[in-house]
Image: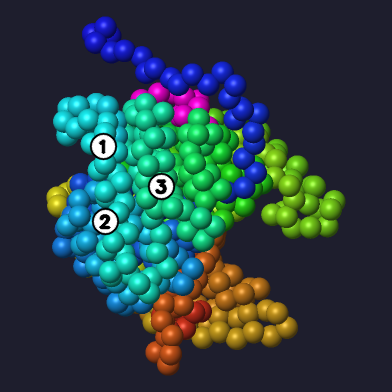
């Protein structure tokens, strides 16, 4: 390889750096740029409907600063900004942000997009890196500073003209900060600050982007500490980070730069963004969580977050992604499984000794940095989670389009069926096709069919009477158990079927007089070498009937 063509990045000299001795003790201010930086880098940018879904997710997770678009760059972005404002969907405590270049016509258009907002920030940038000034724009250092200060004046002018009732803020980015001589970046930002005149009620945000990651993370931290030492009006300046992941070290660079004193972090969920992506907000937040620091955002249902992001972006989350990947709470190695099992048993003993629940004791377990339960997952020791990319999107569509909240292992099982159809038929599987696949796989057809059923209970014992059609012949069955499910298993056992229920869940599909419920049963059907573990699904207005249908669904699938 022609290694001689490349020269090492030259770091700033900071022999008296202090950040290595610092500790991160609280979450930064977060800004999500999923709807701007993340969206512009997608193969197929989000539709307005998917943008709205993403915005609603970010609000639900607790993000208080959200960059929602580049309204001067396209009518689509402008219209989306107007939609959020005019439909009054932005909570009072959320600040929306929009990006613009340092041109007056674009700045005015940007200000116009924010008319009627409660809280908004205009984020302006211009290129300060020597390479970009020389090769891309052919401007001098003096012209670069003039562009930044003139742009700031235009932001103030058009904000005054259009945004008088808006709680308005300003953010400036010297792009690319990491490839700009740090002294010059300070000079440009101080010149911008002289125009803006920050004070106690008038913050300015200086965003310091590693738009292209070129150095080791410690070098970025040195640059941030040097900038903080030398920028004026530090008490009224929010120092913001915007790292990309070109070297694969964006998370580390961000954490070290937070140690160096940065106040704010910009990034995307699961690291979406140009090229290798922006810094990953999910990993950063849960890294804090793993250290006992409140991240101020809620990832307690990580699978729902992942499914929604996959649906909005059309891109899969890697199965080895920290905290959220399909495989991160799964051990395949026997020694790992044994160590985790013993660790969980020790926690159970500790909880019992302390008289508290398992999920209330201090977490310490081999190979698991956090309790999977805290992000809505479980420890999966023996289940090989299918890593095909369609599973997350499939589960999301089944929930949003068909109201079925499939249990995790059922998602895995059904995803294989969907993938099989997709491989055979080619093309995209839409929501209607997916329902047809699900209906054929779990709900219709088969040797066994429930005709009717009734149940009763007395003194904690349940009794089931049912009529089941077997290959067209009706048969009456009866059974007893400690619940309707066990009573029906008892009934069909009397008829020679061997079924053992491994997992069960249910939920309402609709409300009102014609409400429907869904039941999901994971069952081992058969015995010995002929036993199969399969899921069954039942839907009915009566939950007991839905449960019986789910058992027969699993039995029918075993026959098929």
Give the magenta range: 213-225
Q: Which residue is mark 3?
A: 194
Please tell me whether residue 401 belongs to the stretch shown in magenta: no
**Element type at marker 1?**
helix
- Residue 94 appears in which quarter of the rendering? bottom left
Residue 489 pos. (x, y %)? 54, 68
Q: Residue at x 41, y 29 (%)?
A: 182
Residue 453 visible: yes
Q: For marks 3 and 1, give the one nearer the viewer.
A: 3
Checking the image for residue 480, the label placed there is none
Residue 398 pos. (x, y %)? 34, 65
**Element type at marker 3?**
helix
Horizontal side, residue 118 vs residue 371: left or right? left
Upstream in sequence: badge 2 or badge 1:
1
Q: Residue at x 51, y 86 (%)?
A: 454
Look at the image and tell me in which quarter the N terminus lies: top left
Q: Which residue is mark 2?
A: 154
Q: Residue at x 53, y 21 (%)?
A: 14
Using the image as rendered, state which of residue 202 and residue 57 is in the foreground.
Answer: 202
Instruction: Determine contact: label 3, label 2, CB under 8 Å.
Output: no
Using the image as rendered, state which of residue 103 and residue 55 is in the foreground.
Answer: 103
Horizontal side, residue 320 vs residue 374: left or right? left
Using the image as rendered, state which of residue 423 and residue 113 is in the foreground.
Answer: 113
Residue 369 pos. (x, y %)? 61, 39
Cα separation between marks 3 and 1: 15 Å
Q: Which residue is mark 1?
A: 144
- Residue 517 appears in which quarter of the rendering? bottom left
Using the image as rendered, state which of residue 390 and residue 460 is in the foreground.
Answer: 390
Please tell me whether residue 221 belongs to the stretch shown in magenta: yes
């Amino acid at each position: 390889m022609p290694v001689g063509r490349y020269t090492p990045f030259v770091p700033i000299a900071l022999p008296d750096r202090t950040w290595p001795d610092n500790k991160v003790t609280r979450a930064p201010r977060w800004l999500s740029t999923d709807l701007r930086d993340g969206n512009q880098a997608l193969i197929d940018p989000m539709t307005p409907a998917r943008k709205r879904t993403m915005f609603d997710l970010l609000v639900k997770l607790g993000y208080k600063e959200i960059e929602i678009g580049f309204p001067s760059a396209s009518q689509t972005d402008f219209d989306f900004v107007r939609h959020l404002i005019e439909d009054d969907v932005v909570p009072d405590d959320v600040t929306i942000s929009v990006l613009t270049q340092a041109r007056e016509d674009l700045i005015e258009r940007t200000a116009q997009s924010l008319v009627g907002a409660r809280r908004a920030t205009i984020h302006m940038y211009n290129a300060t890196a020597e390479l970009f000034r020389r090769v891309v724009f052919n401007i001098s250092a003096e012209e670069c500073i003039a562009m930044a200060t003139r742009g700031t004046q235009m932001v103030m002018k058009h904000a005054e003209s259009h945004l008088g009732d808006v709680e308005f803020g300003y953010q400036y980015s010297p792009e690319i900060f990491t490839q700009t001589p740090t002294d010059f970046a300070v000079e440009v930002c101080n010149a911008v600050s002289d125009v803006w005149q920050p004070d106690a009620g008038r913050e300015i945000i200086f965003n310091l982007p590693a738009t292209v990651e070129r150095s080791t993370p410690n070098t970025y931290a040195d640059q941030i500490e040097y900038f903080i030492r030398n920028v004026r009006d530090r008490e009224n300046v929010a120092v913001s980070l915007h790292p990309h992941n070109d070297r694969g070290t964006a998370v580390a660079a961000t954490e070290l730069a937070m140690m160096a004193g940065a106040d704010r972090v910009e990034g995307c969920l699961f690291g979406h963004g140009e090229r290798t992506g922006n810094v990953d907000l999910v990993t950063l937040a849960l890294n804090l969580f793993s250290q006992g620091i409140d991240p101020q955002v809620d990832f307690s249902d990580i699978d729902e977050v992942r499914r929604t992001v996959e649906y909005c972006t059309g891109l899969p989350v890697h199965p080895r992604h920290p905290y959220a990947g399909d495989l991160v709470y799964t051990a395949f190695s026997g020694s790992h499984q044994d160590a985790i099992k013993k660790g969980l048993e020790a926690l159970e003993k500790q909880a019992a000794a302390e008289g508290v629940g398992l999920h209330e004791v201090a977490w310490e377990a081999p190979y698991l940095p956090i309790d999977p339960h805290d992000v809505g997952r479980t420890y999966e020791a023996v289940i090989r989670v299918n890593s095909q990319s369609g599973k997350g999107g499939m589960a999301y569509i089944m929930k949003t389009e068909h109201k079925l909240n499939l249990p995790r292992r059922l998602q895995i099982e059904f995803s294989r069926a969907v993938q099989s159809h997709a491989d055979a038929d080619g093309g995209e599987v839409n929501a209607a096709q997916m329902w047809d696949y699900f209906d054929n796989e779990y709900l219709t057809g088969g040797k066994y069919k429930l005709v009717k059923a009734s149940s009763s209970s007395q003194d904690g014992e349940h009794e089931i009477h049912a009529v089941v059609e077997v290959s067209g012949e009706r048969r009456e069955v009866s059974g007893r158990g400690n619940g309707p499910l066990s009573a029906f298993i008892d009934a069909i056992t009397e008829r020679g079927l061997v079924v053992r229920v491994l997992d069960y869940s249910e939920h309402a599909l609709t409300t009102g007089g014609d409400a429907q419920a869904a039941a999901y049963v994971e069952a081992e059907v058969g015995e010995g070498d002929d036993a199969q573990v399969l899921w069954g699904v039942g839907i009915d207005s009566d939950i007991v009937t839905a449960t019986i249908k789910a058992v027969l669904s699993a039995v029918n699938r075993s026959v098929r």
